Image (tube, grey):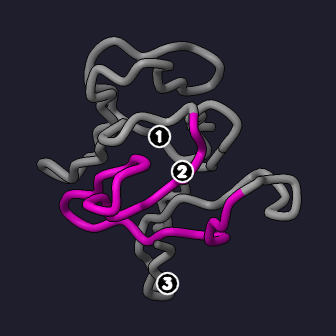
Amino acid sequence: MHRPRPQVKANQPYLKLINRRDQLDFKVDESYPLGELVTIGRSARNDIILRDPYISGEHARISHIDGSYFLEDLDSTNGTFVNGEKINKPLILKNGDKISFRQVEYLFVLQK
């Protein structure tokens, strides 16, 4: 089930879809605002639901801790990549980082 996400507010960090939506076999929003904790995966229990068959049910999470945003892969089958490199431990995201969950790619935008 595709849940519409709230709009990104001024100065709010977010994920911006890099792919063209019409090239994906499932629905996905153009952007996803980030809060204190955001889960990403195929399961309906996630905040960001990606129906890509190569994405695990509980694939990754982004946590806001002490002013930084951390991306963590949750032992997914096919991995999570930042700027083309597979991550194996929580990673601090920087503005402009390219995050890949198989065929779905996002840009991490940290507005100041």
Position of residue 89 in the picture relative to residue 78 (left or right): left
Label 3: which residue? 4
Q: Residue at x 46, y 20 (%)?
A: 79
Residue type (three-letter) at the residue carrying disc 2: Phe
Residue type (three-letter) at the residue carrying disc 1: Lys
Disc 3, SS: loop
Q: Nearer the viewer, residue 67 or 90?
A: 90
Q: Which mark is residue 108?
A: 2
Label 1: which residue? 94
Residue type (three-letter) at the residue carrying disc 3: Pro
| Residue furthest left as drawn | 66
Q: Nearer the viewer, mark 1 or mark 3?
A: 3
Residue 31 pos. (x, y %): 59, 69
Residue 75 pos. (x, y %): 29, 20
Considering only order in the chain, which callout, 2 or 3, is on the residue closer to the N terminus? 3
Depicted 102 relative to depicted 40: above or below: above
